[in-house]
Image (cartoon, coloured by chain):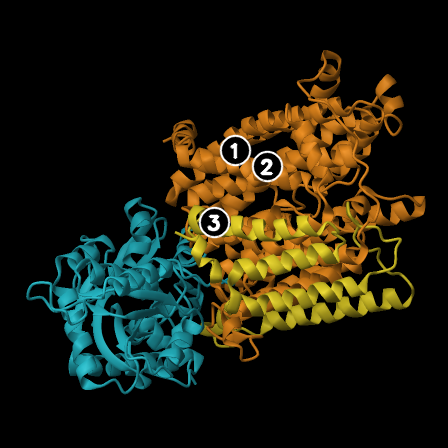
Amino acid sequence: MNPGTESQNPRAYPYLIGILLVVAGIAVGTQVWRGKTAPAEEGEDIDTDQPTNWRGIAVLVALFVVHALLIDYIGWPLAAALLFGGTAVTLGARRWWAVVVASLALPIILLYVFTYGLSVYLPPGPLKVLMW
Amino acid sequence: MLPQLVRRRATRAAALLAAAALLTGCGSGSGSNGGQAAPITGLKIMAPAAPGGGYDQTSRAMQKDLQDTKIASGVQVFNVEGASGTNGLKQLADSKDDNLLMTMGLIMVGGIQTTGSEKTLKDTTPIARLLAESEVLVVPAESPWTTLEGFLESWRQDPKNTPIAGGGAGGSEQILLGLIADQVGIDPGQINYVANSGGGKALEKVLSGEVKAGLNGVSEFKEQIDAGKLRALAVSGDNRSKLLPEVKTLKEQGVGLSFYNWRGVHARPGLSDSDKQKFTDMLTRLHDSEAWKKTLVDNDWEDYFLTGAEYSSFVDSENERARKVLTDIGLVK
Amino acid sequence: MNSVELLLQGFQHALSAQNLMFALIGVVLGTLIGVLPGIGPAMTVALLLPITYSVDASAAFIMFAGIYYGAMYGGSTTSILLNTPGETASVMTAIEGNKMAKAGRAAQALATAAIGSFVAGTIATAALTLAAPQIADWAVSLTSVDYFALVVLALVTVSAMLGSSPLRGFGSLLIGMFAGMIGIDSLSGQNRFTFGVDELTTGLPVVVAAVALFAVGETLHVAAWLRQTPPKVIGVSTVWGLPKEDIKRSWKPWLRGTALGFPIGAIPAGGADVPTFLSYAIERKLAKGKAKEEFGRTGAIEGVAGPEAANNAAAAGVLVPLLTLGLATSSTAAVMLAAFQSYGLRPGPLLFTSNPELVWGLIASLYIGNVLLLVLNLPLASLWAKLLRVPRPFLYGGILTCASLGTYAVNQSPVHLVILLVIGVLGFAMRRYGWPIAPAVVGLILGPIGEENLRQAMQINQGDYSALVSTTFAKIVLGLALLAVVASLVLRVRARLKGKQTPEALVGAGAGN
């Protein structure tokens, strides 16, 4: 190889990582095939003895996509209120008035903190009326 | 090096200013500021690199001084990162916006070559060259070489075992090194160039002694040169650098070339002559202002102003020079 | 100028009204997220990365360091009162601490944790003050060969030591390293793995990746298996201090924990988690008489004092390679490294000379933060404990909202929100199938540093691979890396023969925060 371009060869390292990834993938695949699966990560709020709630996950993913698409139209705070409220209800919040109050309060507080406290811009959407 | 973040730090302030200008009826054409031309409005400056780099600093300095001198108002600056500036170039080349300017410079000239970008500077309208930085060649303080001549002699004898650190591949340092090699009779293809993703890293490589020499902007190395940790052998410009007045130029030491890492401003392709003249006048007024003179001093930049057809032909010659040396090095096929 | 003078100037800087306020925000926020389940310091700092566009560097790092230290304090509260550690480094505290709480000694457990954290944090910060400048001076002589060896050591230990499955840890690391390659290659200017998408030429944004893996992944994971019964929190009254007898039993474990934590944290290997289980093992071995009876039954205070001290000392230790070498060995340090990069600052041997105000202000703020944290945590412990009862639907709704905020605030791009979601789903899958998260984050940040140094070493030595072991330092470091792999395998095999869980396996439970 040209000595002038050894450090500029962008290919070698990706190949190395790629090969290692394939090896690791095969190794994990073999383990799983032989019945050696790893336990799911545990946590304070995790109870792996119950069946997986796939529906809940699908709803959260869909909510997030809607949230991302709506920001350009209704501003960040309202889109965030939808995300927060939707997530809370999906995870089992039942007191509707608490959900509504929290969903509106949190994004508005965050809007103020980021806009005025940290000078980080967020599109306020119709809530522009609350800005000064 | 690492995934950098895209930032639009000052755009909010700029947007506010723009909004304020709109609200106040936006003096454009009202001719109320006593004889002076009305401030140019709606100007956008693209820095084709990450925040904090040379293009970004240049763009933000232009923004500030254009506004402070009331030559323009409500100037926005934004960053388009990636691909040695060619991502930004692509955006400008496809733009129909008459109010869009892009800072660029020698590093983009090299980047277009090494990345094989389909858009080139031919797809833009050159406006002006603004400023330049001189490069300095250094060796570690404990190295045996005290003169440029001594270093060049050892380098010539064994170029492969003389690793030299500088910035990114195809950037100004590698171009300059190729030019020096060519000038003193070393095959540029034999240069052992150690690319770094920033001036700070090139500095570490020289200080650790694992490379024999380093090349970078004068301001990057100045502190360690003054501290006695690095020995400066030569600066690349026509004249000695104000920052390192005791360091001789390449020319003074018999290497017949002068080199600047320069930066300029381009606009979209097919810009009308009247708009081109408007921007040329704007930058000429900026260049003549006290604010800009102070900016140059504060940033250790050298004044390197040029406009019109002379600037266009300068770009062409720089492009040719870079293409030739990068081909010799083996970076451009 | 010597360290003492520089430190005094640092105090002057850190005690300015603005910086003091950021330190206070940092420690309060840190304690808060340390106590709260589902959110850790790495994620919090990642969420706050957008402030690097508007707040000056000193203030931001003072706040981040406060969050980092604060989370270590807060994590112990969760461990002791809820028996489910919020942070990896608090796993060991939970074992004896929760038993003590059940036996009615919650106040003593919380007090020894808080005072131990203060003692260890302060001693370790002093050690950092003395050692860091020396190390930075010496590190100037390190070559790319040496740096490559250090990166290998850090990567190997992070994947081998954490998690119940070293193979999955390694896989996770590789995923992170692969993601780190996306974008324009800084040395050659070529695009890699960008698939023609312009947004990807700048690389995968670290904020987005970290926030996605931690926050979005965790929320989805919780959504899959939310515990339906309310958490069993043990109540506690106001804690004012520690009875004489408990101080007598605690002070030696505090010092031993510090002595373990700082050096292990300071070598770029393993981060803050290893010393906590070493400390636990040692305290259990050394226990005599009454303490020996209490260990594993009613809870021995030594088993809380030691690991808590170790974890805070290690947190200070981890800052040594971060500041002097630019290497991160924990996910929080990795995100802080991203913050440095976002300021265009380069942590490394030259940071101490190029940005003395920032470095010394940060170090001084660590002393201040420790004092603030002691005050915040001792008398207010019962208040923090109330946070453990926060309704989970709201908690995770808030976490997801903050994840969107942290990502969107950076560049107002819905595209990045989509990337966030995709990586978040990956983070969920990794959690569900037992792949630890931390190696992926560390790999994402350290991978490119390793690659750059490897390629430069090859360039300088003209493609001679034997050059990678050409320096004594590189030999030692690579030897240590090998040793870490062997030791981890031996421990696991032994544990399997004995049929019981190793401390490493326990740590795996919380890996990811």
Look at discs 3 and 1 and give the one toward the viewer: 3
Q: Are marks 2 and 1 on the same chain?
A: yes
Residue tagged 2: C69
Inspect the image, locate mark 1, and give the three-letter code of the amino acid beneath it.
Leu
Res A112 label: 3
Question: Quick one: B232 or C503, which is closer to the camera?
Answer: C503
**Residue C450 shown left or right of residue B209 in the figure:** right
**Chain with colour yellow in the figure:** A
Q: Colour of chain C?
A: orange
Q: Residue at 20% across / 80% down in the picture?
A: B276
Image position, residue C59 (x, y; %): 44, 41
Question: Mark 1 packing: few (<14 Cα in 10 Å), some, or many (20+)?
Answer: many
Q: Please report whichever mark, 2 or 1, sits nearer to the chain's N-terminal start.
A: 2
User: Disc 2 and disc 1: Cα gap in Å?
Assistant: 8 Å
**Residue B295 shown left or right of residue A53 in the figure:** left
Question: Mark 3 packing: few (<14 Cα in 10 Å), some, or many (20+)?
Answer: some
Chain for disc number 2: C
Contact, CB < 8 Å: mark 2 with mark 1?
A: yes
Element type at marker 2?
helix
Res C366 label: 1
Q: Residue at 36% across / 61% down in the picture?
A: B11
Image position, residue C495 (x, y; %): 88, 45
Q: Quadrant of residue C217?
A: bottom right
